[in-house]
Amino acid sequence: MPEPFLDACALAQLVRNGVASPAELVDDAINRIEKLNPELNAVIRPRFDEARREAAAALPDGPFRGVPIVLKDLLCYLAGEEIHEGMRVLKEARYVSRRDQELARRLHAAGFVVVGRTNTPELGILPTTEPFAYGPTRNPWDTARSTGGSSGGSAAAVASGMVPVGHANDGGGSIRIPASECGLVGLKPSRARVPLGPEWGDIFGGLVCELGVSRTVRDTAAVLDAVAGPEPGDPYAAPTPSRPFVEELGADPGRLRIGMQSAAFGGTVTTHPDCVAATEAAGALLESVGHVVDPTHVAALDPPELVEAFLLIWAAGIAFDVDHYWPGKLGRPITQDEVEPLTWALADAGRGASASDFLEARRQLQAMARHVAQWYEGGFDLLLTPTIAQPPPLIGDFDSPADNPLHGLFRAAEVVPFTPLFNATGQPAISLPLYWSAQGLPIGVQLVAPYGREDVLLRVASQLEQAAPWAQRRPPISA
């Protein structure tokens, strides 16, 4: 039986060398899920029989042949299989996708075997994973705490050792936030780096990106290589990389100028001392490996209009999901009592926005992207920030009762002021597990590169992983 904390690249090498078979890797992952999932509630729909059949058959000879993976229950559709997106109404209807998403096809072509679907908040709205439909996913570092969201189920599965990598997506931090709270690597790629088709050209005006969470930088780079690149008909595409992303690992990034900011954008949220300490420690580490870290306040990155414009786009998107997209799939309207109070409140806000309001919000976010790009043009290579502003919150902190349906949204604003800006700008951003609090909680730091420059991010992330390895850390609840 392979060691449970081998990364996906190492497991794939075992298969190539004939040391392990795909069937053995899949059985091993299933055993770990069965052991750990009752306590963590990460995998909400096992796919064990299908995974065993696929592992025993002729898998594609891709770079991850036979390696088990989990898919978040949001996007990454598989034809003929249920998808619920954290919604009770889809769960009760047992809604089945009619076709594969391109990302799912690429993961299959890479040789991955899907062993289950993971928990997510309703429609991916909150930075915690506690949907009414499936209940909370618990953090393997402290089961009283959140895993983050909206990819919290995948993050718990990977952090605990159920699988080496998990699919995740990010519309305001949903890859990076769970990576921070669960001690993982989480890369939000550049806008349009990974396709969203055939169902979508972009989602919420380009805010949403697809990739995953992992325990190592090389897994992140290798998965990105396997799934990146435009699909015919995409409305736009990220710049073509000059070479495979895995070739950036260990490459000399040169002496970079890195801006550092631990104060929350907009100045309305206080960053917890542990998160400040994590950022300062990362800054010192970057300096120790030869970079120049500039701790001056980055005034260019404090656009006051961000929150209002961002929320209007999100509210319009939730209204579309509740009023048009999913009713069209289900063949009937969705009623207020079939969704969570926050979902309905956001949909109501979206219904109240006009088409011109929506386009003005899009214009503001696009202007913001230019504004931030100019800051990089002024001589900076990367930006360093906390990933989130507080240690992993307690489960229940984001509950939004019917008489206060927006509570979870206001709580989210206190926790995640650092991630949404870069969904608006389209830039790649990575959360790295470089710090643990005195209470033993992981606290990630975020590095952000100019648009299209995942190569720079991965070079520096690899450099930091070598300087301060994190792979030996294990949460209390683990395989």
Image: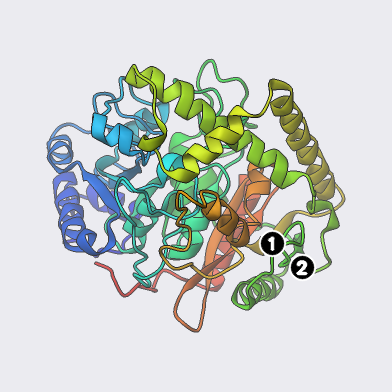
Scheme of colours in the image: rainbow
Q: Residue at x 72, y 55 (%)?
A: 382
Q: Give the mark toward the camera: 2 or 1.
A: 1
The numbered dot on residue 279 is none
Q: Which residue in the protein does label 2 denote?
A: 293
| Quadrant (top left/top right/bottom left/bottom right) for the N terminus | bottom left
**CA distance for labels 2 and 1:** 9 Å
Within 10 Å of the Cα at label 1, are there few (<14), some (14-19), or many (20+) other Cα atoms? many
Q: Is residue 247 above or below residue 137?
A: above
Q: Out of 84 and 188, give the one closest to the viewer.
A: 84
Q: Out of 88 and 436, give the one closest to the viewer.
A: 88
Q: Is residue 142 above or below residue 123?
A: below
Mark found first going from the N terminus, 2 or 1? 2
Q: Is residue 211 visible?
A: no
Check disc 2 and give the amino acid type.
Answer: Val
Image position of 209 (left or right of 309): left
Residue 405 rendering spot, x and y as whole percentages: 51, 48
Check disc 1 and give the amino acid type.
Answer: Leu
> Mark 2 and 1 residues: CB-CB less than 8 Å, in contact?
yes
Q: Residue at x 18, y 48 (%)?
A: 26
The numbered dot on residue 384 is 1
